[in-house]
Structure formats: C-alpha cells, structure tokens
Image (spheres, rainbow, N blue to C red):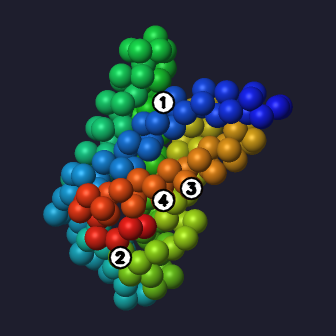
Amino acid sequence: MDLVGAVKAILAALKYYLPAYVANGAPVVFKGKTPIDGGRYFIDGRRLLGDGKTWEGLIAGILAGTSTAAILSLILGEANLLILGFVASTSALLGDIAGSFIKRRMGIERGKPAPILDQLDFFVATTVGLYLMGVDLSLDVVFGLALVTLGLHKTTNYLAYKLGLKEVPW
C-alpha cells in the first residue's frame, strides 16, 4: 500500500475509533465523585483503581462516545456504526480502567505518568472490541492509528491541562 492509500485507509477507519476517542476524553470534562472501586484496596495494599475512575465518568464517556457514533451513523448512513460505537466506547473505557489497575499494581500513583500505557490502553481495548465485533482492520491501519493516537493523546491532554480540566499535562 502506498502512502496515499495508507492515509485513506486510516481516515476510513477513524469512523470506528472516533467514538472511542470521545469516550476516552469525556470523563475529563464530566468529572465524578463516586469511585468505581468504592475505595477498596487490592491484596497488595494499593487501591484497585483510585479516585480518578468514577461511575459518572464511565457513564458520561459511554454516552458521549455512543452519541458520537449515532451522529456518524446518521451522516454516513451506516446503521451498524451505532452498535460498533457503543462497543468502541465501552471497550475504550474498560481499557482505560485496566490501565489504571495495572498502574496501581506497578506502584504508580494517580496522576503520575506511565508512558505508552497511558496513551494506548484505551486504543488496544477498542481494537480488541472492534475485532470481536467483526470489524476487519489491517495491521498496518491499526499501527498507523496507534501512531495517530499517540500524538492526539499527547496534544489533547496538554490542551485539557491548559484549559484547567486536568492537573497534569499527560
């Protein structure tokens, strides 16, 4: 595949990932107060997830991502995008939650960076969710989107920090 073909394929695949991107960013805007882990600790003595993963953020993220999918579905005339968007949104947030669980096990406190894990946990989970739903994405498109995601994640987190939505720029 040439460069133009690769860019076209990546742009075409964005319709599946855009709901996940929106879902992943929504909890930053719609902060909550009810931790998913209920303040519980794991057998290692560390919090399961921490105060940053809330029920309100989870619900807001799924709703925002699924709403994005509904709009895409209407614009593109592809009814399947609604259910795929719900799956992508839910998978993205479950991936982010799994990333927090891993960070706590590694002794990385809330708000501290974990390069690559912080940027790609939601992306990997979204890719798995879409794959399980039968979305056919080539490895080069997934790799290309992962690179886009790394840059996009860094940029949007920095903007959220500058806007006062996040305490740290990562």
Indicate which label's residue lies in the foreground, 1 or 3. 3
Q: Quadrant of residue 104?
A: bottom left
| Residue 76 % position (x, y) | 47, 15
Q: Are marks 1 and 2 in contact (CB under 8 Å)?
A: no
Indicate which label's residue lies in the foreground, 1 or 4. 4
For disc 4, the neighbor class at 10 Å (few under 14, some 14 to 19, many from 20) is some
Q: Is mark 1 on a helix, strand or loop?
A: helix
Alpha carbons under labels 1 and 4: distance apart: 25 Å
Residue sitting at x 59%, y 47%: 148
Q: Are marks 1 and 4 in contact (CB under 8 Å)?
A: no
Q: Is mark 2 on a helix, strand or loop?
A: loop
Q: Quadrant of residue 48?
A: bottom left
Image disc number at residue 110 = 2
| Residue type (three-letter) at the residue carrying disc 1 | Leu
Which of disc 2 and disc 1 is earlier in sequence?
1
Residue ID for mark 4: 154
